[in-house]
Structures are given as C-alpha cells and as structure tokens.
C-alpha cells in the first residue's frame, strides 16, 4: 500500500502523445498522479475538466499533472481533444501501475460489481515522496482538494 511520507513507486507508461513517461524523471517538481476509471464518462469528465478549468492555478504550483486510466493512448487522445485537457494522460491497460498503487479493485455500478480503477490521487513531492494520498475522490471537489494539498 502506498503511504504518505514514503517514496512513490516508480513506473513508466505511455502518454497520449506516444512518449514513455517515467515518474522518477520528474523529480524536482511536484507531481499530481490521479487515477480515474474511464475516459469520457460523466465523473471522469467532471474531474478532468475541473483540473482544466483551474489550470492556471495548477501551473502556479509548478506541479506536473498525470491522469492514469486503463484506456489506451488513442482513447486518451480523443478525450483530451474533446475537452481541451492541458495535461498528460497515461495508459495503464494492464492496470499494473494501478495495482502497485492499490487502486485496482471492485467498482459498483447499477447494483453490479466490475473490476476497475478506484478514483484516487497521489500528490508526490519534488523529492519523489508521497505527500498526500486521496482515496474515494469526489470529482466535483477534486481540483480544489488537490490545489489545497499542493499548498495553493
């Protein structure tokens, strides 16, 4: 289980731009690593657009924002374009990183349980340590909660 004050598990995933992004290569800047279930669904869109709408505030913190879901790169490209998202989306189709961060599990929709990513955010400090763990994130409050965690 990923814990506050401990080093964030390193990983490398492919971005919506087709680049390989390694978490450890971002040291020196805070990182907002947020996991969400699926591109272009109501809660995930609300969450992503909240960050987009507060983008100047995120930029002021110097943080790198990375959204992670099991969707592939092409899905991420479409999601970013449709909603004008200014941050990087990472593809975790085999949910290896979601597993490592403890956010893969049973989701409950319409009385059914399905496997998926639990909406969670990890604020990682510039030294690569987990500064804040946010589980069961509310999409409507996410951007403000993350900015508060970044001290903004």
Image: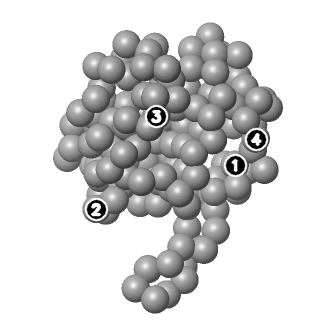
Q: Are marks 3 and 4 in contact (CB under 8 Å)?
A: no
Q: Are marks 1 and 3 in contact (CB under 8 Å)?
A: no
Real-space Cα separation, disc 4 to disc 2, in angstroms: 29 Å
Q: Are marks 4 and 2 in contact (CB under 8 Å)?
A: no
Asked if residue 124 lies left or right of residue 37, the reply is right
Real-space Cα separation, disc 3 to disc 4, in angstroms: 17 Å
Extreme residue toward the bottom, this view? 111
Q: Quadrant of residue 109?
A: bottom left
**Label at residue 146:** 3
Q: Position of residue 94 (x, y in %)?
A: 62, 59
Q: Is residue 18 above or below residue 137?
A: above
Q: Nearer the viewer, residue 120 or 76?
A: 120
Q: Position of residue 29 (x, y in %)?
A: 57, 14
Q: Which residue is mark 4?
A: 3
Q: Are marks 1 and 2 in contact (CB under 8 Å)?
A: no
Asked if residue 9 lies left or right of residue 139, the reply is right
Real-space Cα separation, disc 1 to disc 2, in angstroms: 24 Å
Q: The C terminus lies in which quarter of the figure?
A: top left
Q: Which residue is mark 2?
A: 42
Asked if residue 104 lies left or right of residue 100, the reply is left
Real-space Cα separation, disc 3 to disc 2, in angstroms: 20 Å
């Amino acid at each position: 289980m990923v814990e506050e004050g401990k080093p964030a598990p390193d990983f490398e995933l492919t971005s919506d731009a087709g680049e390989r992004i390694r978490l450890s290569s971002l040291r020196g800047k805070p990182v907002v690593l947020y996991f969400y279930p699926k591109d272009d669904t109501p809660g995930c869109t609300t969450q992503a657009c909240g960050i987009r709408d507060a983008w100047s505030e995120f930029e002021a913190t110097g943080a790198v924002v990375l959204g992670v879901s099991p969707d592939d790169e092409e899905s991420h490209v479409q999601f970013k374009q449709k909603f004008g998202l200014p941050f990087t989306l990472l593809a975790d189709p085999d949910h290896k990183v979601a597993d490592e961060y403890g956010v893969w599990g049973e989701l409950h929709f319409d009385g059914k349980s399905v496997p998926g990513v639990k909406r969670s955010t990890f604020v990682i400090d510039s030294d690569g340590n987990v500064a804040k763990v946010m589980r069961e994130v509310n999409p409507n409050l996410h951007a403000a909660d993350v900015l508060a965690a970044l001290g903004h």
